[in-house]
Amino acid sequence: MASANTSWSEEDFSCSICLDVFSSPVTTPCGHNFCRTCITKFWDEQVKYKCPVCNQIFDTKPDPQVNTLLSELAAQFRTTVRVKEQPCVEPAEVPCDVCTGTQLKAMKSCLECLISYCQTHLEPHQRVTVLKKHRLVEPMDRLEDRMCKKHDRLLELFCLTEQVCVCLLCTVTDHKSHPVVPLKEEYEVKMAQLGKIEAEVPQMIQERKQKIKEVKDRVELSNKDADREIAIGGQVFTALIGCVEKCRDEFNQTVQEKLKSTEKQAEDLIKELEQEIEDLTNRCSEVTQLSHTKDLLHFLQTFRSLKDPPPTRDWTTVEVRPPSYVGTLRRSLDQLEETLNMEMKKRDDDAELKRVQQYEVDVTLDPDTANGWLILSEDGKQVHDGGVGKRLPDNPKRFTNYKCVLTRQSFSSGRFYFEVQVKDKTIWLLGVVRESIDRKRGTTWTPETGYWTLYYYKDGLVFRDNPDVRLPLRAGLQKVGVFVDYDEGVVSFYDVEARVHLYSATGCTFSEPLYPILYPGPRDYGGNNSAPLIISPVNQTD
């Protein structure tokens, strides 16, 4: 008896509609098999009921019956296929290169054959004498990549000079004079480096995220600054436009007044001329009438009045000159320029003060730096000369030769601003100094020695330099603002009440922390200059 053919393919168990393994197969009256869902859907979409394979037409919609035998065979085939397709090797494991069906896990790799073997296919290497001489190692994938292309030997060493993997023969040929180490040793070194990189990268990412935040914050701050500048600029330009319009109106008024003066002069002359014409006309009438009289006595008596004609002016030199406008516009423009310059300076100073006041810092005086003659308030905001020297513990920070005091706070970058009330003072000095100034011996207070200060006394206001920069003495100076841009090297002083810029030292070089400094000046026996210097909160007015 002939044996049954048990070699089945997927086509034998595939539906001709969905081309997949049968699912609930049914048989049509013509003997063809389909998935129940596939044939039902096919007939629902047709006008006539026919077989998709042989095109036989049915009068009515058939009710195909389940093919029990085919259903069982399809289920078994599907299970077999699933088993074959299911890998028996974990992702981290090396598969056997010999297995043709289900690949099993390799137990060894042969460096001679360049093949990995499972336990079953490894058996010849353990039994055949020739194969026993082959070098077996732990399972490796991509064996051809692990062999030296020149010597056909395993790459098991690492050349430190050329940073490449080499075989044992390479160390006595091309890499003879190069230091080499086992791959594991270099692997551990590189893994340590990788670990360091792995630890550093998140930090680098965080730093860059922080930098992005800083950039965004800068842009946001720039937007706010731009909006504020536009608002301030709008106020300035509105004021300047007002000045121009006022000057235009005054110019027009001046021209109109000159024109009115000319017109008034002309009107007066015309009235005078008209009066003389009237008088002369009356005289002409009298003369004409008298010339026709025949009464001798009346003629002679009346003629006497004709000897004195009415007074008249010599009009040959009289003229009405058009007003001259030469220089009128120039004088108006000169006045406008002067007004605009004053207004621009005033507005610019005010706008600048508003800008720097944003950088207000809260500073307090440091008693450890105060000279023994000075008295500080409990809140560290006021200082004055007490008139009596005190014995205080000496320390490197304390001023011993000058009656000065520094703040507790110092600044090494960015911008900062503070205000000091100088009301009722006759002598004072304030500004900023670098940390390393000499606090024990006398020295000149100049930028070269680390002082950027404004000094006031009875007859003058100066920025201390070599030579001093003398500034206009301002009456009623009550509060001074000090602004420092550390990075740009700028120190500026302002009359806060008048909202006027006093002076700016530019191009300064700062390389160490800066401290605000206050010098209240000496107190004389009459009690003059006893008022304190007061660090005041900033009042930012609109």
Image: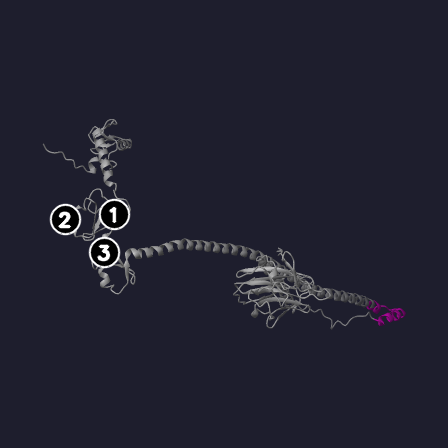
Q: Is 197 in the magenta?
A: no
Residue that label 2 marks: 128
Answer with mark 2 or mark 3, whichever residue precedes in sequence: 2
Label 3: few (<14), some (14–19) or many (≥20) C-alpha neighbours in 10 Å? many
In-image side of 354 versus 46 (left or right): right
Answer with mark 1 or mark 2, whichever residue precedes in sequence: 1
Residue that label 1 marks: 94
The residue lying toward the viewer, choosing from 258 and 445, is 445
Spot the residue most to the left.
Answer: 1
Residue that label 3 marks: 154
Q: Quadrant of residue 426?
A: bottom right
Q: Position of residue 375 (x, y in %)?
A: 66, 61
Q: Quick one: SS at disc 2? A: loop
Q: Amino acid at mark 1?
A: Val
Q: Amino acid at mark 2?
A: Val
Figure coloring = one colour
Residues drawn in magenta: 287-308
Q: Position of residue 508 (x, y in %)?
A: 54, 67
The residue lying toward the viewer, choosing from 60 and 367, is 367
Q: Quadrant of residue 447?
A: bottom right
The residue lying toward the viewer, choosing from 445 and 503, is 445
Asked if disc 1 and disc 3 are in contact, CB closer than 8 Å, the reply is no
Answer with mark 1 or mark 3, whichever residue precedes in sequence: 1
Q: Quick one: SS at disc 1? A: loop
The numbered dot on residue 372 is none
Asked if disc 2 and disc 3 are in contact, CB closer than 8 Å, the reply is no
The residue lying toward the viewer, choosing from 148 and 69, is 148
